[in-house]
Amino acid sequence: MRYRALGETGLTVSEIGFGCASWWGKKAFDEAQALSLVHAALDHGVTFFDTGAAYSGGEAEPRLGRALRGRALHDVIVATKAGTFHDGRRVARDFRPSAIVASVERSLRNLGMEALPLLQLHGPAVPELNDEMLGALEGLKQRGLVRAIGANSFDPAVIEHIIGLPSFDVVMVDYNVLRPERAGLIDRASSRGKGVLAGMALAMGHANGQVLRLRAPRDVWYALRALKNHRSDIAKGALFGFLGDLPDMTAAQAALAYVLADENVSCAVVGTTRMAHLIENLAASGSTLTPTVLAQIRQAQGLE
Ligand SMILES: NC(=O)c1ccc[n+]([C@@H]2O[C@H](COP(=O)([O-])OP(=O)(O)OC[C@H]3O[C@@H](n4cnc5c(N)ncnc54)[C@H](OP(=O)(O)O)[C@@H]3O)[C@@H](O)[C@H]2O)c1
């Protein structure tokens, strides 16, 4: 596993991170299997774990806490999110500064930690990033509850705004083969000293057609999510079928190598519920795409 600096936070992260979200965190997914994936990731050198208060119906964060219990965590960067929560039926938002502080305190209990290496606001709107919010975030740092502050948004205008805010150390963007247009934003974030995390590095499985291969109930759940929220990505992903025919790497590895070819990206975050996929994804660290494959990708992206 290779490692990269997380912007100017002073933190170092494995270039492939483990996303503790979606089906991985759900009660329907066997706890022992979920924990064994985290343990295998740790054993293979993963030091970045991404989760959120609202993920998997609120179950992902305490599950990650159970997975990490008793493990040596001195190099491990756990990132969680605040601003959203699960109200028992659906994901709800609460970006009042007091709610963010309360969410951090709950997350620390869920994760069994005394301080969070990275707190990310989960999809804030620009008006919510006001002085009161920035003061509350600084307060969390001063109390020693949070080391670095970030934000996740798939709205480029929000990320652009955050890049200009000195209080923020990290941004998480939706960068993958289907989103080459994020490269400029990533470059600007990095040149302002922000660490950049690529969420959706595998485009939720769309980049290799995986999302429509139904082998188990969890696959139906991922396929329905894709059909509901990311229908256009399924069509786009079909243009990248050639990634499945490369001689020396799988489609998922090629998709990750594409993201990591951008040296401004600190970490590509991927979720999985299958051990074989985890091992496959981790093996992408350090692999590079040939100029021919890069040209094919650019063509599929409509850039050549
Ligand atoms: N803040 C947000 O709103 C937000 C949104 C999206 C993502 N994220 C973060 O970023 C992480 C990664 O996002 P993601 O787009 O990867 O979504 P994800 O929700 O974690 O789903 C990943 C999908 O890719 C599949 N997959 C993983 N490895 C594979 C492989 N080697 N070959 C084929 N399919 C594979 C998984 O299926 P299997 O289980 O079968 O492997 C799953 O269907 C998330 O877990 C989360 O931490 C955050």
Image: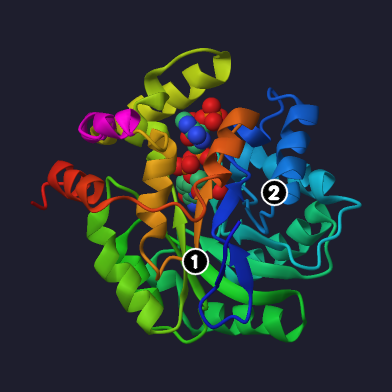
Image coordinates of residue 283 in percent, x first then y, are 55, 44
Measure the alpha-carbon separation of dots 2 and 1.
18 Å
Q: Quadrant of residue 235?
A: top left
Q: Nearer the viewer, residue 264 or 82?
A: 264
Of all residues, the one furthest to the front in this rendering is: 247
Colouring chosen for the image of the structure: rainbow
Q: Quick check: 16 above or below 227?
A: below
Label 2, secondary structure: give it. Answer: loop
Image coordinates of residue 78 in percent, x first then y, are 69, 60
Check if residue 286 falls in the magenta segment.
no
The answer to whether residue 165 shows anywhere in this view is: yes
Q: Quadrant of residue 191?
A: bottom left
- Left-right relation of 147 to 135: right
Q: Nearer the viewer, residue 261 or 57?
A: 261
To which residue does mark 1 refer?
266
Of all residues, the one furthest to the left in this rendering is: 304
* Picture residue at 68% right of the left edge, 59% below the top: 47
Check if residue 240 falls in the magenta segment.
yes
Under mark 2, the amino acid is His
To which residue does mark 2 refer?
44
* Mark 2 beta carbon near ligand 1 (under 8 Å): no
* Picture residue at 25% right of the left edge, 35% below the top: 240
Q: Quick check: 153 above or below 22?
A: below
Q: Label 2 neighbourhood size at 10 Å, few (<14), some (14-19), many (20+)?
A: some
Q: Quadrant of residue 160?
A: bottom left
Magenta segment: 234-246
* Picture residue at 30% right of the left edge, 47% below the top: 177
Total labels drawn: 2
Pointer 2 or 1: first along the chain: 2
Under mark 1, the amino acid is Ser
